[in-house]
């Protein structure tokens, strides 16, 4: 099922994938006041499909305040704003969707209550069977990579294997979590994934988040031109 606001989210399900797009994830620790201008800078620098608001272990009141600050910034740039795991915060902040990591039951409940007006994505996918169950349930995207693990420089091998398998066989979009390096963005995109999720590679870039978004998009553009069907 396609969300009604798919224009903000990204490409519809195309027979020929044109290009991977960026799926930004907030830092693990977010101070909304100081992070907001960094987000503005990043989103003004190039194509971004979505922003996942996912600070580590934020109390509900803090997550609410963060979401209410960041969602309007994302939406102003036509970027879909997603909230990790809390439908109440998502609704109050008027975000575009929710990212579910709590398993099949929680995913099905979110799909039943929130689609088609909101995006419902499935994460914390560890094996192929879980991915197929999430796809069959109607998740709007399948996210490969574990948000609760500290990122290494490179992409986890399992993330690449799962993403390449999914992108080659299934229609629902997949998102691959990159590592801390820009090289890892290229590795993810070469699987054919619809979206490349980036966290530290953007916010910890030595030249700042705008330069990081521009560099990542240049990588995605280059890989798209190298595809046989480009």
Image (cartoon, rainbow, N blue to C red):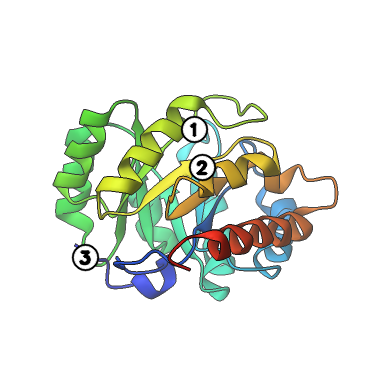
The residue wearing badge 2 is 54
Q: Residues within 10 Å of mark 3 (few under 14, many from 20)?
A: some
Splitting the image into 4 quarters, where does residue 82 fall?
bottom left
Please provide percent x and percent y for residue 45.
71, 68
Secondary structure state at the residue bearing disc 2 = loop
Query: Is label 1 in contact with label 3 (beta carbons under 8 Å)?
Result: no
Would residue 86 be visible to someone looking at this image? Answer: no
Residue placed most toward the observer, 15 or 140: 15
Mark 1 vs mark 2, CA separation in Å: 9 Å
Mark 3 vs mark 2, CA separation in Å: 22 Å
Please provide percent x and percent y for residue 56.
55, 33
Residue placed most toward the observer, 188 or 66: 188
Residue placed most toward the observer, 32 or 175: 175
Residue at 46% in and 53% down: 195
Q: Residue furthest right?
A: 207
Residue placed most toward the observer, 229 or 222: 229
N-terminal of the pair, mark 1 or mark 2, is 2
Please provide percent x and percent y for residue 146.
46, 30
N-terminal of the pair, mark 1 or mark 3, is 3
Residue at 18% in and 51% down: 138
Residue at 69% in and 48% down: 202
Secondary structure state at the residue bearing disc 1 = loop
Please provide percent x and percent y for residue 61.
49, 43
Query: Is label 1 in contact with label 2 (beta carbons under 8 Å)?
Result: yes
Would residue 210 be visible to someone looking at this image? Answer: yes
The residue wearing badge 1 is 147
Residue at 50% in and 60% down: 227
Q: Of discs 1 and 2, which sits in the foreground? A: 1
The residue wearing badge 3 is 116
The answer to whether 176 appears left or right of 126 in the picture is right
The answer to whether 106 appears left or right of 147 in the picture is left
Q: Is residue 46 above or below residue 30?
A: below
């Amino acid at each position: 099922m396609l969300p009604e606001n798919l224009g903000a989210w990204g490409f519809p399900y195309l027979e020929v994938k044109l290009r991977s797009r960026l799926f930004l994830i907030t830092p693990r620790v977010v101070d909304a006041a100081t992070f907001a201008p960094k987000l503005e800078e990043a989103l003004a620098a190039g194509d971004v499909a979505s922003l996942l608001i996912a600070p580590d272990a934020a109390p509900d009141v803090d997550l609410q305040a963060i979401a209410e600050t960041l969602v309007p910034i994302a939406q102003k740039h036509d970027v879909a704003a997603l909230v990790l795991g809390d439908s109440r915060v998502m609704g109050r902040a008027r975000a575009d969707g929710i990212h579910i990591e709590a398993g099949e039951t929680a995913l099905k409940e979110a799909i039943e209550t929130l689609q088609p007006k909101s995006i419902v994505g499935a994460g914390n996918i560890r094996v192929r069977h879980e991915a197929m169950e999430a796809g069959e349930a109607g998740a709007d995207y399948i996210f490969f990579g574990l948000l609760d693990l500290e990122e290494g420089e490179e992409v986890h091998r399992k993330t690449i294997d799962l993403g390449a398998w999914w992108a080659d066989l299934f229609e629902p979009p997949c998102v691959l979590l990159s590592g801390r390096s820009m090289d890892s963005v290229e590795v993810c995109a070469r699987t054919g994934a619809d979206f490349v999720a980036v966290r530290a590679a953007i916010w910890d870039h030595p030249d700042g988040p705008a330069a990081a978004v521009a560099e990542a998009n240049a990588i995605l553009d280059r890989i798209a031109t190298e595809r046989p069907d480009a």
